[in-house]
Structures are given as structure tokens and as C-alpha cells.
Image (tube, rainbow, N blue to C red):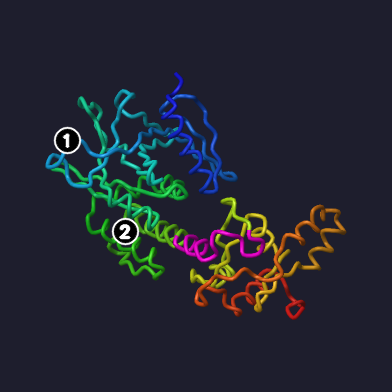
């Protein structure tokens, strides 16, 4: 059965999100729920995706809690398909906010009522927009559920940690710790979380995953903003930009704005491979040793155009406190193999 144009658009948002997370996606059917194979390198994730648009809660003022939003489970019969051969996702998507919400498919009943829906709150969506993740824990008389809102580029973090994330619903204190860690990471602070309070069910690893993703997204947002969403070495925009660490975090770098550069895809790769460097005085140079190696191996096609497109010096952020530290730039050159030519 061919899906509607609206459903096809929702599924396109899913595949776009998977790609923005650095994975690839292949559709294996043309129906809803959609079978999608997400893959990255040798890792494979067979997914079965149910998705609906997020809409305001019904019933009018006084009937539903303030700020309630939801997805209506229409067009598919109960129960949701689940199997050890694939991972089932129950998703909502807000076109206005460009935010997904993931719901716990394991806690959905086998038989649905006349107007089945799954609830969320708008504040969780707003948290996801500013932090990367947002959470809404809903307690009923019989059980608790945790809805997880997330930005598109966090979709594979959600997929990988889906089961563990939703198990936080069983522990209100653990959920609060998860939320606190998200807030601190979004503010660029070292998250001080009592991991003993979130022990069990893979929760510690889940908290670390969320902290890392939120920290990365916060860093990216800041870096692209201070460089005006342009490449710092060639001024390209085109939504082809990365936030690059000058001194890599595993090498002792930080998520400070002064340890970042906004680089287009090609110059990010060139910077990390040591083909182009930014010196402490903000001069931009091509690594001549690397250039000669490319020429000798007959892989220097486009090198002159590459040179011509570079600025002579870094395009600096407006505020002094956002500009790269010279010490970081020099250390970044050493990390990338610019030994012996640092004074050139």
C-alpha cells in the first residue's frame, strides 16, 4: 500500500535525521510502518518505524493538562509489531519545531480504544530545541511512562539507548538526575550527577550518552553562531558546516568556544588531515610537505583551486572572548603533524 504524501514526508524527515546523525538509511518497503535499515560502517540497525505528526491535545481548556500535545495512533491496527529481528520505533514529529518525540512501544496496550493517542508536553519539545533532549514523565494509577523529545541529529543516540531511556520512567529520582545532567551539559558545565542514583538497567551509560550529545550540540550551536554560519577559512555557508575542535577533546581539548572553528566539510577534513592549518596569529597556510606528497602520488587534482579558495587569515568572531586562543591553534597544529614548520 502506498503511503500518503503527509506520511511520506514524515518518513523523509526520519531518513534525513538518520543522515544528519552520520548514518545512512535504506527503505525496505513502501508502507507504514516503514522498514528502514540504518547503517554506519559495519554496524546495522534494522528499524520498524511508526510515525505521526505531533498535534495539540484535544478536549479544550480544562479537559487536558495545559501544554499537552500528542500523536493520534490512526491508520494501523493494534498491537504494534515487535520482533527480535528489528527494533520498533514509535515516533512523533513536530514540523514547526523540527523535533522528534520517542514513546515506549512496550507500554502500549494490545487493544486500543476508539481514539488512541500518546501524550507529551510542550515543555519537553522546548527543552529539546535548546538542549538536544527533553523529557516528560507521565504517572498514571497503573504505571509511569517517559516520553523523550530530541533533535534530529540525536536520533541514533535515541535508537541505541531507546530501551534504557524509557526504563527511567520507573524511577522518578533517576529521571530527575537525567534532566539535571542535560541542563548542566547544555550550559557548558561539567555535569555533576550522582551516578549511584541512576545505577542499573544501563542508566549510567545512557546518562553519559545524553551528556555527550548535549555537550556536542551546545558546542556546535555556539561555534556556528559566532562565525555567522560561515566557514572560517573560506566563508562558505550552504548548510555544509561543522563545528571543529582545535585541540580534540580526547587530546585534552575543551568545549569552550575559543577551542572551536566553523569549517565547511572539505576544510574540516583538510584541517584534521593536516593539509591546511591555522597558525597562532590566525594565518592560514597549506602544508607544503603534504602537498608534495599528493603531487608525487598524482593525487593533487584541484589543489590549486583549493589554495585559491582559502582566505589569507582566519575570519574571526566579532567578540574577543569567542576568538580562538593562539595556544590552542599552535597545539592544534602539533596534533595534526605540523612538526618542523611551525615558524613558517
Q: Earlier in the sequence, mark 2 or mark 1?
A: 1
Give x and y (percent) for residue 300.
82, 55
Give x and y (percent) for residue 254.
50, 71
Crowd band around label 2 with a 10 angstrom C-alpha radius: few (<14), some (14–19), many (20+): many
Residue at the far front: name it: 318
Give x and y (percent) for residue 200.
31, 55
Q: Quadrant of the N terminus?
A: top left
Can residue 47 be found in the magenta stretch?
no
| Location of residue 34 by image quarter | top left
Q: Secondary structure at mark 1?
A: loop
- Horizontal side of residue 326 vs 51, given as left or right: right
Numbered mark located on residue 59 in the image:
1
Task: Give the residue at x 38% y 46%.
Answer: 97
Task: Give the residue at x 56% y 45%.
Answer: 40
| In-front residue for pair 17/79 | 17
Q: Which residues are magenta?
A: 218-235
Crowd band around label 1 with a 10 angstrom C-alpha radius: few (<14), some (14–19), many (20+): few
Can residue 219 be found in the magenta stretch?
yes
CA gap, disc 2 and disc 1: 32 Å
Numbered mark located on residue 33 in the image:
none
Task: Give the residue at x 66% y 64%.
Answer: 233
Residue under numbered circle 2:
178
Amino acid at each position: 500500500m502506498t503511503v500518503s504524501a503527509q506520511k511520506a514526508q514524515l518518513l523523509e524527515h526520519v531518513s534525513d535525521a538518520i543522515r544528519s546523525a552520520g548514518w545512512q538509511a535504506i527503505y525496505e518497503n513502501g508502507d507504514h510502518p516503514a522498514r528502514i535499515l540504518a547503517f554506519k560502517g559495519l554496524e546495522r540497525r534494522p528499524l520498524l518505524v511508526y510515525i505521526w505528526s505531533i498535534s495539540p491535545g484535544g478536549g479544550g481548556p480544562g479537559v487536558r493538562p495545559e501544554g499537552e500535545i500528542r500523536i493520534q495512533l490512526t491508520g494501523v491496527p493494534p498491537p504494534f509489531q515487535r520482533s527480535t529481528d528489528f527494533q520498533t520505533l514509535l515516533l512523533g514529529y513536530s514540523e514547526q519545531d523540527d523535533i522528534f518525540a520517542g514513546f515506549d512501544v512496550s507500554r502500549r496496550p494490545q487493544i486500543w480504544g476508539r481514539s488512541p493517542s500518546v501524550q507529551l508536553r510542550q515543555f519537553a519539545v522546548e527543552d529539546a530545541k535548546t538542549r538536544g533532549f527533553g523529557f516528560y514523565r507521565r504517572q498514571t494509577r497503573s504505571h509511569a511512562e517517559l516520553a523523550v523529545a530530541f533533535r534530529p541529529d540525536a536520533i541514533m543516540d535515541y535508537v541505541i539507548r531507546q530501551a534504557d531511556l524509557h526504563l527511567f520512567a520507573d524511577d522518578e529520582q533517576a529521571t530527575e538526575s537525567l534532566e539535571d545532567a542535560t541542563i548542566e551539559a547544555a550550559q557548558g558545565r561539567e555535569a555533576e550527577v550522582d551516578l549511584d542514583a541512576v545505577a542499573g538497567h544501563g542508566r549510567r551509560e545512557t546518562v553519559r550518552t545524553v551528556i555527550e550529545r548535549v555537550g556536542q550540540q551546545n558546542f556546535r550551536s555556539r561555534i556556528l553562531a559566532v562565525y555567522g554560519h560561515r566557514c572560517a577559512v573560506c566563508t562558505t555557508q550552504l548548510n555544509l558546516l561543522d563545528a571543529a575542535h582545535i585541540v580534540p577533546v580526547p587530546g585534552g581539548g575543551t568545549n569552550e568556544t575559543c577551542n572551536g572553528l566553523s569549517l565547511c566539510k572539505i576544510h574540516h577534513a583538510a584541517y584534521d588531515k593536516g593539509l591546511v592549518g591555522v597558525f597562532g596569529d590566525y594565518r592560514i597556510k597549506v602544508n607544503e610537505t603534504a602537498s608534495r606528497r599528493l603531487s608525487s602520488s598524482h593525487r593533487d587534482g584541484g589543489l590549486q583551486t583549493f589554495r585559491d579558495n582559502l582566505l589569507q587569515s582566519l575570519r574571526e568572531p566579532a567578540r574577543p572572548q569567542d576568538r580562538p586562543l593562539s595556544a590552542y591553534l599552535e597545539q592544534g597544529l602539533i596534533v595534526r603533524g605540523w612538526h618542523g614548520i611551525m615558524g613558517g
